[in-house]
Amino acid sequence: MKTQPETIIQVKNLFGGYGDTVILKDITFDVYKGEVFIILGGSGCGKSTMLKFMIGLERPFSGQVYVDGTEIVNASEADYNRALRSFGVMYQNGALFGSMNLMENICLVLEEFTDLPRDAMESIAQMRLNQVGLGDAADKMPSDLSGGMRKRAAIARAMALDPKILFLDEPSAGLDPITSAQMDELILQLSRTLKITFVIVTHELPSIFTVADRCIMLDREVKTIVATGEPHELQANSDNPWVRQFFNRQASNEADKS
């Protein structure tokens, strides 16, 4: 008998947007512990907005978001700060501090959330850099790195507090195909070896097919989830023409014929 996977994130009946504009409505889904979960969809569908709601960077109009047992939409400052320790975030542009080298970038997180001595912080930072393939780059400045290396460094910083969950916003954006494939392999490696749960926002089909255990697809027109499941299954068997069009990379007139 197959055991029910453990839920680590729950989004319930979420409505959100900006000002009077609703971007997402009636969003409900679970993320299971240890899986690589993708939030995907076309441009302007609310993928990055959904991520901001999930990490507490923006507040939805209504609904609930549970991250490792903490409801973060209405959490007190103390509860939210505790929840912050359970997840890390890699933003699309990396968001590294340009005036600090990689070691200092990672140690800054540890300084804010721990009372560890400096040598312990540096030891942790070096370990994280080793885990993303940047063990020899601790003294390098962000400006000295390629785009792919900056993203790896941002993942190392997001891992500083040994989080259970990593949120990645467009990790393959702006990368060439080889570097993008290397990023996919890093995600799979960290998932396998560290048992981290990944929530990834992307529309890059090669990456989706390579790394995703499950995904949800958002649609800009209806403002909600139009598909949930394993990418290859949705590609082959979805009864939604738009979903098949997306996964098969078809032009509209081709999808309309299917």
Image (spheres, rainbow, N blue to C red):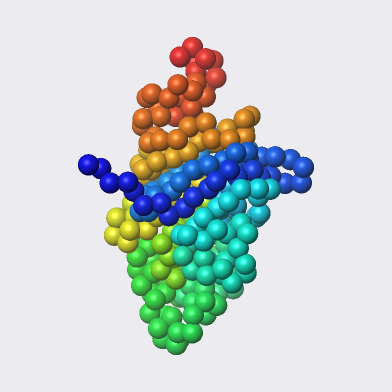
Tell which residue pokes out farthest to the left in this image. 1
Using the rendered image of the protein, determine whether residue 154 is visible from the camera's viewpoint: no
Above or below — where is 53 with respect to 154? Answer: above
Q: Quadrant of the N terminus?
A: top left
Q: Quadrant of the C terminus?
A: top left
Report which quarter residue 235 is drawn in.
top left
Tell which residue pokes out farthest to the front in this image. 1
Residue in view at x 36 percent, y 32 percent: 232
Report which quarter residue 186 is drawn in.
bottom left
Residue in view at x 47 percent, y 60 percent: 69
Residue in view at x 52 percent, y 55 percent: 66
Residue in view at x 66 percent, y 54 percent: 59
Tell which residue pokes out farthest to the top in this image. 257
Of residue 82 and residue 135, the one placed in the foreground of this image is 82
Above or below — where is 66 with respect to 158? Answer: above
Report which quarter residue 152 is drawn in.
bottom left
Where residue 207 appears, as percent x and y from the top left, is 41, 42
Position of residue 85 in the picture relative to residue 123 (left or right): right
Above or below — where is 24 with respect to 194? Answer: above
Where residue 160 appears, as percent x and y from the top left, is 44, 70
Using the rendered image of the protein, determine whether residue 75 is visible from the camera's viewpoint: yes
